[in-house]
């Protein structure tokens, strides 16, 4: 898809903006404020949250890392960490970081701001919040990463803030889903492809990217550490499969796959909203935003998936033309569109 990167990034931001006012509300309260969920309008102005801000930070760091590596072919952990760390800390220090950011990200970025501190001492190994996989889409959009680079970069960018193995695995799966859709995978085959990938990755600890991060947890081995994360993801994929066997578009999606505050549930519920409406991207965003959980993160993931699948043309100009950070998103998309 020639414009998959632009479509995914704009979709992510649109979902974020649509879900920003509805986060922390239940479905009845959302509809009382916004009207019927299928008619939800994009707020004006279309402000986004830390989800989009950190997606841009990761995208800028990834672009800088690839340039310093002489292209993505040479990208490795040593090239990736310094610029991504720098951009995360810039976000933490920014006066625009006032969109109810997560405590895990704030704490980790504060620790990352100390240049003498090894990055593995900053990532919070007890947190599997969704703050890592809601920002990982850029890793899935770089068209020339090898599978090992994509997986390693997705997990490492998570580990800088969210070091729990489930945050790592969910970030890896999210980036892989974005890549598959950008490359033309059919929505109906996506869940099966993700399950196969999770099974194959279950005991693969990417030490060349993660170093000895696992030692900061209480696991007896790196394989045991990472398997915990993949097992959580496989469990939520079971719930996704069950929801897709008996789809109910009118029901709160969080009832089927979780409220999305934690990484694996954000992935599954964002996927569910997309897969309920694979050819109706605005409906997918509205369903995600009108949910009882972490609405902005769920909707931003649904938008990333829909945009990767359908391209930039998925989003009407009356929405895409007024999203906050539009210029930055378009610039990153242009780099990775093929």
Image (cartoon, rainbow, N blue to C red):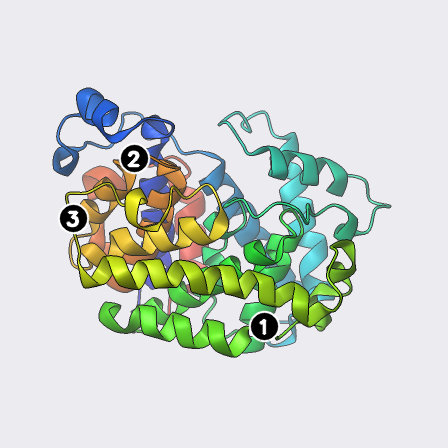
Say if mark 2 contacts mark 1, CB within 8 Å. Answer: no
- Labels 3, 2: front one: 3
Q: Is residue 278 left or right of residue 133?
A: left
**Residue in the foreground of this view, choosing between 105 and 276:** 276
Q: Which disc is residue 249 wearing?
A: 3
- Percent x, y of residue 311: 27, 60
Query: Which residue is label 2 attached to?
Result: 18
Q: Pick whichever of labels 2 and 1 is earlier in the sequence.
A: 2
Please rate how many residues cluster around mark 3, counting C-alpha atoms within 10 Å: few if below 14, some from 14 to 19, many from 20: some
Residue 149: which numbered mark, if any? 1
Q: Is residue 54 above or below residue 43?
A: below
Nearer mark to the viewer, of 3 and 1:
3
- Quadrant of image for the N terminus: bottom left
Place residue 182 in its image quadrant: bottom left
The alpha-carbon separation of the residues under discs 2 and 1 comes to 32 Å
Determine whether the residue tagged by mark 1 lies in a helix, strand or loop: helix
Q: Which residue is drawn at 51% across and 79% down?
A: 200
Q: Earlier in the sequence, mark 3 or mark 2?
A: 2
- Mark 3 in CB contact with mark 1 (< 8 angstroms): no
Mark 1 neighbour density, 10 Å: few (under 14) some (14–19) many (20 or more): many
Could you tell me which residue is drawn at 75 percent across and 56 percent down? 218
Q: Which residue lies furthest to the right in this view?
A: 116
Label 3's element? loop
Of the numbered discs 3 and 1, the one sitting upstream in the chain is: 1
């Amino acid at each position: 898809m020639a414009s998959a990167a632009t479509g995914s990034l704009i979709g992510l931001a649109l979902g974020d903006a649509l879900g920003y006012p509805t986060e922390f509300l239940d479905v009845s309260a959302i509809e009382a404020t916004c009207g019927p969920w299928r008619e939800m309008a994009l707020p004006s102005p279309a402000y986004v949250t830390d989800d989009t801000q950190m997606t841009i930070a990761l995208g800028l760091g990834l672009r800088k890392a690839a340039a310093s590596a002489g292209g993505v072919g040479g990208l490795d952990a040593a090239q990736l960490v310094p610029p991504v760390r720098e951009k995360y800390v810039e976000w933490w220090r920014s006066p625009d970081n006032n969109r109810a950011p997560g405590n895990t990200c704030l704490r980790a970025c504060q620790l990352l701001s100390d240049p003498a501190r090894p990055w593995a001492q900053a990532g919070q190994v007890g947190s599997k919040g969704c703050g890592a996989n809601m920002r990982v889409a850029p890793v899935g959009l770089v068209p020339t990463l090898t599978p090992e680079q994509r997986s390693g970069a997705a997990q490492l960018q998570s580990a800088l803030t969210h070091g729990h193995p489930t945050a790592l695995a969910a970030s890896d799966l999210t980036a892989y889903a974005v890549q598959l859709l950008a490359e033309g995978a059919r929505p109906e085959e996506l869940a099966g492809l993700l399950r196969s990938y999770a099974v194959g990755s279950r005991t693969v600890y990417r030490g060349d990217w993660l170093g000895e991060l696992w030692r900061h947890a209480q696991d007896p081995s790196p394989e045991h550490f990472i398997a915990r994360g993949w097992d959580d993801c496989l469990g939520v994929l079971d719930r996704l499969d069950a929801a897709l066997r008996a789809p109910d578009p009118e029901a709160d999606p969080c009832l089927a796959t979780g409220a999305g505050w934690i990484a694996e549930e954000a992935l599954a519920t964002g996927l569910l909203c997309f897969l309920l409406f694979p050819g109706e991207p605005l409906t997918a965003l509205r369903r995600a935003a009108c949910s009882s959980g972490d609405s902005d993160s769920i909707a931003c993931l649904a938008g990333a998936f829909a945009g990767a699948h359908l391209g930039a043309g998925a989003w009407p100009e009356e929405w895409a033309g007024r999203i906050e950070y539009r210029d930055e998103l378009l610039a990153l998309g242009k780099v990775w569109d093929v």
